[in-house]
């Protein structure tokens, strides 16, 4: 592995974990648990082991440009439409 692929893997792991956390917040503290579950499932597209499994089983992997577009959609949906910060306030109030 070269340095570029290590950095891309770390970034992919971090974004996948962030999207997974956003999915959990939306599932349990939002008014749309279906959207949260959808985000949880989309987060798996960013984990390198899942990408390797998809490549082995299906013979292709998700292209980087698709992941970038999907990431922009997730950020837009979670922050703008999904009102993430309001849901985080609800989560903190429950704790």
Image (cartoon, rainbow, N blue to C red):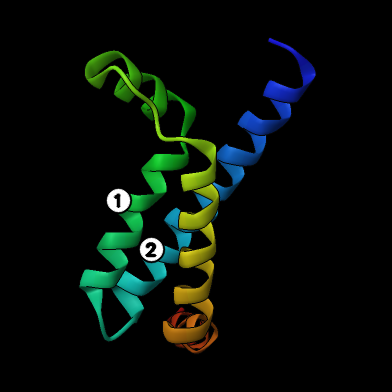
The residue that appears at 35% across and 60% down in the rendered structure is 39
The residue that appears at 54% across and 63% down in the rendered structure is 72
Question: Where residue 37 sits in the image (x, y, percent)?
Answer: 26, 61
Question: Where residue 13 sits in the image (x, y, percent)?
Answer: 56, 38
Q: How many marks?
A: 2
The residue that appears at 46% across and 78% down in the rendered structure is 95
Image quadrant of residue 2? top right
The answer to which of 19 and 51 lies nearer the viewer is: 51
The answer to which of 35 and 21 lies nearer the viewer is: 35
Q: Give above or below for 73 relative to 16.
A: below
| Residue under pointer 2 | 23
Image quadrant of residue 8? top right
Say whether marks 1 and 2 touch (CB < 8 Å): yes
The residue that appears at 55% across and 84% down in the rendered structure is 85
Q: CA distance from mark 1 to mark 2?
A: 8 Å
- The image's mark for residue 41 is 1
Question: Where residue 31 sits in the image (x, y, percent)?
Answer: 27, 86
Q: Give above or below for 1 relative to 44.
A: above
For the N terminus, the quadrant is top right
Left-right relation of 92 to 2: left
Question: Where residue 29 sits in the image (x, y, percent)?
Answer: 35, 79
Left-right relation of 11 to 84: right
């Amino acid at each position: 592995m070269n340095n570029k692929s290590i950095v891309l893997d770390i970034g992919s792991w971090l974004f996948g974990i962030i999207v997974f956390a956003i999915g959990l917040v939306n599932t349990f503290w939002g008014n749309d648990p279906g959207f949260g579950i959808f985000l949880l499932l989309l987060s798996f597209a960013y984990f390198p082991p899942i990408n390797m499994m998809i490549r082995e089983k299906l013979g292709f992997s998700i292209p980087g440009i698709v992941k970038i577009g999907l990431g922009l959609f997730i950020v837009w949906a979670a922050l703008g439409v999904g009102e993430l910060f309001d849901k985080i306030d609800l989560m903190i109030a429950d704790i």
